[in-house]
Image (cartoon, rainbow, N blue to C red):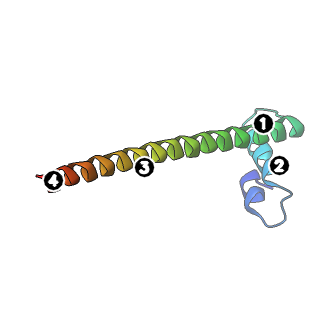
Amino acid sequence: MNSEIWAISENNTSVVEAALSLANDEGKQLKLLKTMITFVDYYLFLYEISRKKNESELQILAQEVATGKAIAKVLEIVNLEKKKL
């Protein structure tokens, strides 16, 4: 069976085995366990990048909120000073 057809068929065993089949079809001769470990490592790497990106976005958001609060406080003080005049 053609490896690409096997990869998309309902009865294939797993995505990792499909990837292994396609890689070996190209002559890479990978072993299943090595492929599974690489597959898991790759997705852990992507997860870590995603998590760090989210943490970074949260830090930026916190800074923006703090800046917004500081600006609001300054405007409040300016308005109070204007009322005194």
Q: CA distance from mark 1 to mark 2?
A: 12 Å
Contact? badges 2 and 3 (CB < 8 Å): no
- Mark closest to the chain's N terminus, 2 or 3: 2
Most extreme residue toward the front, as rendered? 84
Residue type at the position of mark 1? Thr
Q: Position of residue 23 (x, y in %)?
A: 74, 40
Where is mark 3, residue-wise? 65
Q: Which of pointers 3 and 4 lies earlier in the amino acid sequence?
A: 3
**Residue 38, how many percent across, how many down?**
78, 36
Marks 2/3: CA distance? Answer: 47 Å
- Which of discs 2 and 3 lies nearer the camera? The answer is 3
The residue sitting at 79% across, 46% down in the picture is 21
The answer to whether 73 is drawn above or below residue 42 in the figure is: below
Q: Nearer the viewer, mark 1 or mark 2?
A: 1
Residue under the point 78% across and 58% down: 6
Kindly indicate the quadrant of the structure image that contains residue 32. top right
Disc 2 target residue? 17
Task: Look at mark 1 in the image and give the residue it sits on.
Answer: 38
Label 1 residue SS: helix
> How far is mark 4 from mark 1, CA to CA?
69 Å
- Residue positioned most to the left: 85
